[in-house]
Amino acid sequence: MSELYKLTAIEVSEKIRSGDLSAEEYLYSILERIKHVEGEIHAFVTVVEENALETAREIDRKVKRGEDLGSLAGVVVAVKDNICTRGIRTTCSSRMLENFVPPYDATVIERLKAADAIIIGKTNMDEFAMGSTTETSYFGVTRNPWNLNKVPGGSSGGSAAAVIAEETTVALGSDTGGSIRCPASYCSVVGLKPTYGLVSRYGLISYANSLEQIGPLTRSVEDCALLLSVISGHDSRDSTSVDLPAKDYLKNLDDMRDIKIGLPHEFFGEGVEDDVKDAVLKAIGKLEDLGASCLEISLPMMKYALAAYYIIAMSEASSNLARYDGLRYGYRDENARGSFDEVFSKNRREGFGAEVRRRIILGTYALSAGYFEQYYIKALKIRTLIRRDFEKALKDVDVIVGPTMPLLPFNIGEKIDDPLKLYMCDILTVPANLTGCPAISIPCGFKNGLPVGMQIIGRPFDEDTILKVAYAFEQSTDYHKLRPSI
Amino acid sequence: MSKDRRVSVEEVRHIAKLAHIKLTREEEVLFTEQFNRILEYFSIIGEVDTESVPASYHVLDLVNVYREDKIQESLRDEEALKNAPEREGRFFKSPRIV
């Protein structure tokens, strides 16, 4: 059997559209690959082999009939398990939603289907997307394909691991404070958090609604641009979706002229490992060779970003997760008796894991009388100041570049008992969520066999520019071609 | 316990009750200790002068997005009830309220 599972989305869709490859044959190659590596990686919560095969055969029939095919013809997509899929259980990696089968598709899923993509399954994640390691999943950890003792990053750890382990062509994740970019960095894939409002959140199970976006995880920048072109665009079912014309992000990849890069010293300061700094600075040198000019900048409010982010995210979580009471759907303790108060409190205690409970309770605290101004409102004001920092910086430069993660991938179990230590890992990713700016993480080096990711942050709705810079770097390096030996 | 303790076990128990999450005794103690460390870190934002700064509830310029008040297709009863742990006829069955 040839190694068809190694193909990129661009290659797969071209071969299937031209009749060189059948969708079914390609899918069998992926299914074989999953059987071979999934036992070690555990990237998936659910694999829907039968559904996927049906879709593949339907695509092949369309080819035979000479019908037009969508831009993702036969491309296999792994979907993070917090994005609703009609008829396929959607768990958020939580006991609370262990048996929840959505009666509708998220908008991004409708768009994937319309583009003739094949959904292969639902990927593991930190419970309700709360974490940076995929260790808080009710269904067990996902392992980093580069080193099985290391975390894959999170919360979209299953999506990133599945992509680099070649168990899928591409994947979708969601990013609230770095949940696409962190695992992209730790697994050496391309991961994009789009501008807030670019991709519909309809059908994304809400954690912190003013911060999160759905985005692609892929093995190449081209695939990222292709997937973004399919999932982005206005949706009247999400009132925060922005009404802009649809765009083909593949069109302008090739032209990185006169790009000005801002290097904030806050991204290279205390808390960032030297190994990470060295790899990213070397990568920036490469960008300069390619014609970019660099400017040192300062984002003084960065110091307060992490605290402001966590206060806002937890506050929104306490409100968004109030809906889980085990009444209309979700976990219910069959033996719970008593008033609704007691029954709900018991369902929520048993249905949510420790980190989710922690964030809901802290969020409730930050929103409660007496603390509302001190924590929540104060954090929203800091958010304004951080936005001003970024707006000002992005007037002088086209993109801001730095590391994605301050640390190399660490051991499973190493930090899980210390919530604050884990929160600190998000220090470089949360600003893009607070400001709404688009940001991408791309492979930029290795240290001790572990990947390093470079983060490129752009102006709101200027995904084109960050993709251009990412593409130029990728095309002149080989990091994106390396695969773990599994 | 340190003097700048921000939250007590009693307070954590009270807030958990407001959040409808029942905690065990051990968890109340553990969470209280963790919350104090986390809130201590959060307090860093107190040093910024935000006197005349507006709050950013969200990052878009969108204000009140409306649609026509027309009836649209929505989920059928059966679909909406499909995930309910307990139901009676066309209704979700809830614990006793009064």
Image: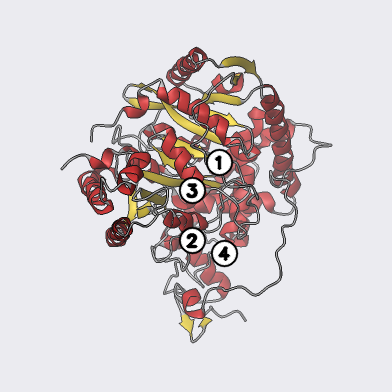
- Of marks 2 and 1, the one in the foreground: 1
- Measured in 3D between alpha carbons, the distance from the residue under mark 2 to the one under mark 4, in whole angstroms, is 14 Å
Q: What secondary structure is found at the residue carrying circle 2?
A: helix
Residue type at tag 2: Arg
Report the front residue among A377 and A345.
Answer: A377
* A38 to the left or right of B89: left
Q: On the same chain: label 4 and label 1? A: yes
Q: Label 4 belongs to which residue? A: A323
Residue type at tag 1: Pro
- Of marks 2 and 3, the one in the foreground: 3
Point 63% across, 48% down: residue: A210
Point 59% across, 15% down: residue: A294
The answer to which quarter of the image holds residue A134 is top left
| Percent x, y of residue A147 | 29, 32
Residue type at tag 4: Arg
**Mark 4 Cα shell of 10 Å, populated few (<14), some (14-19), many (≥20):** few
| Percent x, y of residue A59 | 32, 57
- Measured in 3D between alpha carbons, the distance from the residue under mark 3 to the one under mark 1, in whole angstroms, is 13 Å
